[in-house]
Amino acid sequence: MSDLASSRPVPDEPPDPRPGGPADVSGLCPSSAELFVPAAREPSDLDELAPLAEMIADLADLRGRGGFEGPLPGTEDAEPTAGSIASLLASPATSAAELADAVAWCYDDTALPLLLPLARHPDPGVRRAVAQALPSVLGEAPPDDTVHALILLSADRDADVRDWACFALGTQLSEVDSATVRDALAARLDDPHDDTRCEALLGLARRRDAQVLPVLHERLARDNVYSLEIDAAGALGHASLHTLVRGHLSGWDDDVVARVCAALRLTDPDGVGDDLLDGLADWFRAGAPHATDEDRYWWAVTLQLLEHAEYRAPEIAEQVHYRLQSAEPATALMLGSRLSQLAGDHGWPRWRPGY
């Protein structure tokens, strides 16, 4: 059984499916390339961005006026910034590999205008680095240009570029939802690259797009499935997937077990499980977040569920609140918790900011 890792690889280590480990989690889960062309887009956006040379010159001018600080090439230990990337771009001696490494690990919001045009760089390593970095440098900027760049990259000829772009669109920017984004992800549902195909599926499931339900039925009916397909079933949370998920409880590496159990609970037609809800209520009674590690187990399980399907927070919060109705201190802790905040973000009326 193959597994797609939940953590992303470093830029020079392309993701590969890994054989699943021997763990059997059944007792731990209570029932409860050349054909690719750039994606279509409006004839503006990236084409109308300021020329890259002008942006580099502007950054250099800021450095000269003392309004900008950033390391120059050769300071390998410093975190890449807009200034260091601008310097790399300005130097004819910069190799594509050096530029890709700097871009991939850049978290400087001011570098966004420099990175966007690089979505059309001729080197696939640079384009992959751009797909990796764009969500990290988006900051408070409107997401439109970033989303258009990632949609372009999601149809790249290079499989690793497509994989990173679908991960960025599907998971990292899952709060950005539009027909254009969904269409771009749907276009990758039959991608020949396993990771890309699974990231696109998960991105649509996180948006609760109905078109993935028949796809999940078909994929989970196979003997061998990918862990991201199990994640997608949990994110969608449709009860018709529960039996299919239950058929894939064994054979996973230890780091995947919790995710499989979460998907099993999230697809259970009877809900996430009284054991979890009772355990979570006990955790708040025990003084969360200062409870013992043993009591914290159910909080960890809850966080795993919400990682898959944050929209289930109101359901969980309401049932835990009901269990705590006669315990005022525990209720206060619960209403001030991250669970309640997430539930409030999804319309739970009991949430009061700053409670």
Image (cartoon, rainbow, N blue to C red):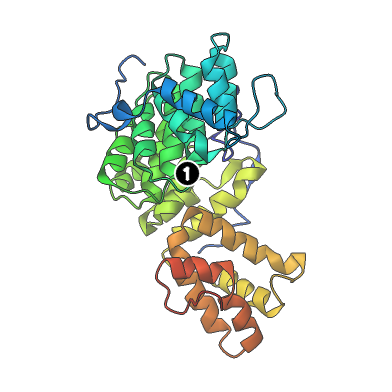
Of residues 212 and 187, which is closer to you in this image?
Answer: 187
Name the residue: 60% across, 44% down: 256
Element type at marker 1?
Answer: helix
At horizontal 55% and vertical 13% (from top left) the residue drawn is: 91
Image coordinates for residue 182, horizontal then vertical, percent: 30, 42
Q: Is residue 232 visible?
A: yes
Amino acid type assigned to the residue bearing label 1 in the image: Gln
Q: Position of residue 96 (x, y in %)?
A: 53, 14
Q: Nearer the viewer, residue 65 or 112?
A: 65
Image position of 267 with respect to 107: above or below: below
Direction from residue 227 to residue 150 in the image, left or right: left
Q: Residue at x 59, y 91 (%)?
A: 326
**237 relative to 247, above or below:** below
Q: Is residue 62 left or right of residue 48?
A: right
Q: Residues within 10 Å of mark 1 (few under 14, many from 20)?
A: some
Front one among 348 and 274: 348
Q: Is residue 272 visible?
A: no
**Farthest residue, direction front:** 65
Say which quarter of the image contains residue 9: top right
Looking at the image, which is closer to me, 33 or 344? Answer: 344
User: Looking at the image, is 75 positioned above or below residue 66?
Assistant: above
The x and y percentages for residue 254 are 66, 44
Residue position marked by numbered label 1 in the rendering: 172
Q: Quadrant of residue 27?
A: bottom right
